[in-house]
Image (cartoon, rainbow, N blue to C red):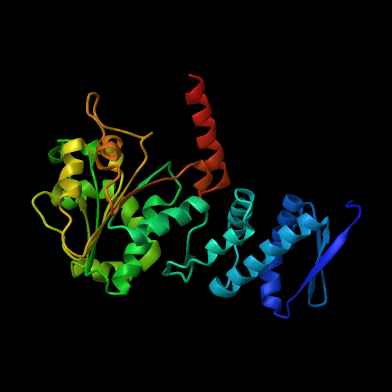
């Protein structure tokens, strides 16, 4: 039981929002109660929060932010609440939860796509400020997905004429000829994660229409050689598997009115032994150049299943001990 309780209330007459906020069997509210050590209950149209002053103020800020989120995207997931709690946990400025108001675009399913962590917010801001951005961090931090969402929105706003997405087919190496099928069928397995993200953001039908018109291009990195990419939003994924020569080749393709976003995880390099990763060395080469920014994301920015963050942290501890 909470002793010396104070209370604060929020009046809300929209019962659909209340139902969404509380969640199935009140699981959302139970999570907030446990995280902030408060009691929350509903009395008519009032959400009453009880506890010590600091905790009820934090829970009050959180609930108001979640209500705004429900109004925008019409639903609230359990994960949304975890993201919001982590934002509050990692900063003393509770207004920082407003980053969940930073809408990038709406997915094909009507889902609001926005940064979910402080690191993701820094990344999105960097994408808006610069023509070349490097997003470096572990799996699940939204490096590629957010870059694609920004590319789609820039295309919708007619800021660019096309979207180009590429990644090195390192696993295929020089042996594509030994794989069955035509060239597209050979490289598709290496590009599948890009297709999946685009289907989610654009919807499969819309993506296929744009793809057939050449307004969206998904291709192996080798296809970039010799080209000049004007008025394009260009994303290089899995850049840790580029060589220094490939990285230089890609960066020098950038034409007028274009942006280049390079994403990768320097802990997951699949290059052959003796090959140096272009992503590892490029930060030293391009450091301090205006218009180029490096954003490092960490396990705190992971927005997949909550166990993914714990798994990555466990591996990091094991590697540091070895």
Quadrant of the rendered image containing residue 214: bottom left
Residue 113 visible (yes or no): yes
| Left or right of residue 313, residue 220 in this image | left
**Residue 180: x %, y % from top left:** 18, 44
Q: Residue furthest left?
A: 226
Q: Nearer the viewer, residue 57 or 206?
A: 57
Res. 182 visible in picture: no
In percent of width and height, residue 273 lies at: 25, 24
- Please state which of residues 312 and 278 is positioned toward the viewer in this rendering: 278
**For the point 43% across and 66% down, which residue is it?**
104
Q: Position of residue 215 (x, y in %)?
A: 21, 68
Q: Is residue 149 above or below residue 308?
A: below
Is 85 positioned to the left or the right of 6 in the image? Answer: left
The residue sitting at the bottom extreme is: 13
Front in this rendered view, residue 128 or 277: 128
Horizontally, is 177 left or right of 163 in the view? left
Q: Residue furthest top?
A: 322
**Above-or-below relation of 138 to 30:** above
Residue at left offset 75%, top offset 61%: 57
Residue 216 in which image quadrant: bottom left
């Amino acid at each position: 039981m909470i002793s010396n309780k104070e209370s604060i209330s929020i009046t809300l007459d929209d019962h659909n929002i209340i139902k969404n906020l509380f969640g199935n069997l009140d699981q959302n509210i139970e999570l907030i109660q446990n995280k902030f050590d408060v009691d929350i209950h509903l009395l008519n149209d009032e959400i009453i929060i009880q506890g010590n002053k600091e905790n009820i103020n934090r829970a009050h800020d959180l609930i108001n932010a979640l209500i705004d989120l429900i109004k925008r995207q019409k639903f609230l997931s359990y994960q949304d609440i975890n993201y919001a709690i982590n934002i509050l946990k990692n900063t003393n400025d509770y207004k920082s939860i407003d980053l969940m108001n930073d809408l990038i675009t709406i997915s094909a399913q009507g889902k609001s796509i926005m940064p979910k962590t402080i690191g993701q917010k820094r990344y999105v801001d960097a994408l808006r400020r610069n023509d070349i951005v490097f997003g470096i961090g572990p799996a699940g931090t939204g490096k590629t997905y957010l870059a694609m969402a920004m590319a789609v929105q820039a295309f919708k706003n007619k800021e660019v004429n096309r979207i180009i997405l590429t990644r090195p087919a390192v696993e295929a190496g020089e042996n594509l000829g030994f794989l069955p099928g035509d060239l597209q069928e050979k490289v598709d397995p290496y590009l599948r994660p890009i297709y999946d993200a685009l289907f989610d953001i654009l919807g499969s039908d819309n993506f296929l229409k744009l793809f057939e018109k050449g307004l969206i291009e998904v291709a192996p990195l080798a296809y970039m050689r010799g080209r000049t990419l004007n008025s394009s939003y260009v994303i290089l994924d899995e850049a840790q598997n580029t060589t220094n020569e490939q990285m230089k080749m890609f960066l020098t393709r950038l034409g007028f009115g274009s942006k280049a976003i390079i994403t990768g995880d320097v802990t997951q390099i699949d290059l052959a032994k003796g090959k140096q990763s272009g992503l590892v060395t490029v930060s030293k080469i391009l450091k301090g150049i205006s218009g180029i920014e490096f954003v490092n994301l960490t396990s705190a920015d992971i927005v997949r299943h909550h166990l993914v963050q714990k798994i990555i942290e466990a591996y990091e501890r094991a590697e540091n001990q070895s």
